[in-house]
Amino acid sequence: MTTKEVIYELRTKNGLSQDELAEKVFVTRQAVSRWETGETVPNTETLKLLSNLLNVSINTLLGSPNKLICQCCGMPLEDEIIGRNRDGSLNEEYCKWCYADGTYTYSDMDDLINVCIPHMQQQGFTEEQARSYMKDMLPKLDYWKRYEELSDNGQFEQFKKQLIGEINALDIEGMPKLESLNALVGSFVNLEYPLPSGMKAKFLDDSATYLGNQLESEFGGERCFGVLANMDFILICTYEAEGENPELVLYKKR
């Protein structure tokens, strides 16, 4: 699709008139009309405003001329999984798993590789093939090439260690000791829990990134423990395969 087609489609999809879109990005209706006829394209600052307003990358607005990949893990980037800066704008360099609200979530290349391997095995890679591929690819990506410049001197890792300590101190019966926390996108882990009232509720934001892990129950059986946390809360649950029949064990504000 061309830029004019993308802007028209997104404007109409969001139920906006040309006047309404123009007002929101501080241009005239005539400017929007010229974009949609292909006479002109938005300038850089207006593209940023359109990206935030329409919740798509600038790359998408320009007709996807580039194939974006996460510069931390190498994953192909679609609009739905692009990470966000602290101000909520999209950062087209990273996925949500590697970059959340202005924070880089990985400081150890081996940790990232260990997280990626199970997903690559589902795509037909052996563990050896996946590990070899990642070890070759990751050093070529911008984040790892510029790690000393981009890293936070271990502050985020220290926060994760603090969280792990708090979670283990809860001493949940049947839950083994938590050793690590990984970045998890809300839409993938936002389970619907039954409440005592008979109603069901979700506690997460689909678009947010959390820290979490899955742990096998010490009691055996098919149920696993799920751990999710961020700066504001800790959530512990159990569930069966594929997140079926979830039960909330604990929700605690920090």
Image: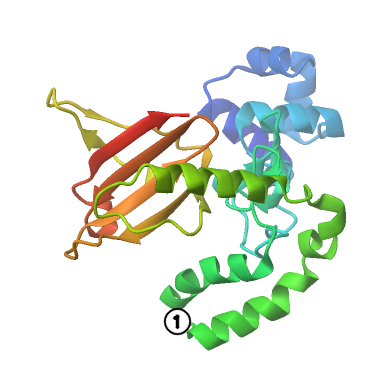
Q: Residue at image x 74%, y 57%?
A: 66
Is residue 41 found left or right of 223 in the rendered image? right
Secondary-structure class at tag 1: loop
* Percent x, y of residue 4: 71, 37
Residue behind mark 1: 124
80 or 200: nearer the eye?
200
Q: How does the figure colour the protein chain or chains?
A: rainbow
Q: Can residue 104 be seen in this view?
A: no
Q: Residue at image x 79%, y 50%?
A: 153
Is residue 8 found left or right of 219 in the rendered image? right
* Percent x, y of residue 15: 52, 21
197 or 69: nearer the eye?
197
* Percent x, y of residue 85: 71, 36
Q: Residue at image x 29%, y 44%?
A: 237
236 or 30: nearer the eye?
236
Q: Can residue 13 be seen in this view?
A: yes
User: Taking 221 as reference, is 251 above or below it?
Assistant: above
User: Taking 112 as reference, is 245 above or below it?
Assistant: above
How many marks the image carries: the answer is 1
User: Taking 17 as reference, is 76 above or below it?
Assistant: below
Q: Residue at image x 43%, y 54%?
A: 213
User: Taking 51 as reference, is 68 above or below it?
Assistant: below
Is residue 164 found left or right of 251 in the rendered image? right
Name the quadrant containing residue 134.
bottom right
Name the quadrant containing residue 241.
bottom left
Is residue 48 found left or right of 81 in the rendered image? right
For label 1, the crowd category at 10 Å Cα-Cα, with few meaning under 14, some 14 to 19 and many 20 or more, is few
* Percent x, y of residue 14: 53, 25
Three-letter amino acid code at the position of disc 1: Gly
